[in-house]
Image: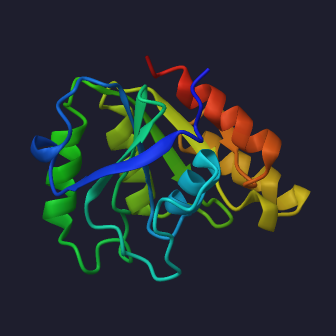
Amino acid sequence: MIDFKKARFVVSAPSPSLAPKDGIPAVLMIGRSNVGKSTLLNALMGQKIAFASKKAGKTKLLNYFLVDDSLYLVDAPGYGSTGYATMSTIHFATMMEDYVKVPSLKAICLLLDLRRDPGEDDKRFVSYLQNTGKPIIAILTKVDQMNQSELHKAEARAKELGLDRVLKSDLKGKSVDKIRTVIASYGK
């Protein structure tokens, strides 16, 4: 099993062409701005290594974190109107189109806050990711802020998006361990 606590920041890259070329498998962490990507990364790695901001759109580059010399977790900028208010839609789209072609990318963790109905940009983005051919690990975030009824609605919304297997993150032990196990299966 990969030891997620043995993690370190490696590089921020504006495009995959400037990413590490060592062939180590990678898992992309992506979702709408302010969905909790950096917070989940910190929980997975057991340390404050990724910058988590309350203000949306702070991540503008692909941030590579090497976990146990076996796997990169790659924190991507957020999508959505608040996500690239300071980053052009074209730049974000180009970054994603280039990155999903990288052979070392083994899976995509799609983080979703489905306390509300998904918007059209959510539906388009999920459809785009499904068409990349890369495995998608859907993760519901902020479930600690939901009651049982809201959680059931969120799970139903995920199914409506065509996401069958959905993990839940409350940033606590069991949910984080389950997410680690699934992500680790894509490492070397």
Query: In which quadrant is the C terminus drawn?
Result: top left
The residue drawn where x is 55% and y is 26% is: 184
Name the outermost residue toward the right: 148
Q: Is residue 110 left or right of residue 83?
A: right
| Quadrant hosting residue 162 | top right
Q: Which quadrant is home to the N terminus?
A: top right
Residue 50, horizontal then vertical, whole percent: 47, 61
In the depicted structure, whether residue 84 falls above or below residue 93: below
- Looking at the image, which is closer to me, 145 or 155? 145
The answer to whether residue 174 is left or right of residue 38 is: right
Q: State left or right for residue 26 relative to residue 152.
A: left
Q: Residue at x 53, y 35 (%)?
A: 137
Q: Is residue 71 left or right of residue 103?
A: right
* Color scheme of the displayed model: rainbow
Q: Is residue 135 above or below residue 77?
A: above
Q: Which residue appears at 10% of the width and 42% of the height?
A: 17
Image coords of residue 117 (percent x, y): 60, 63
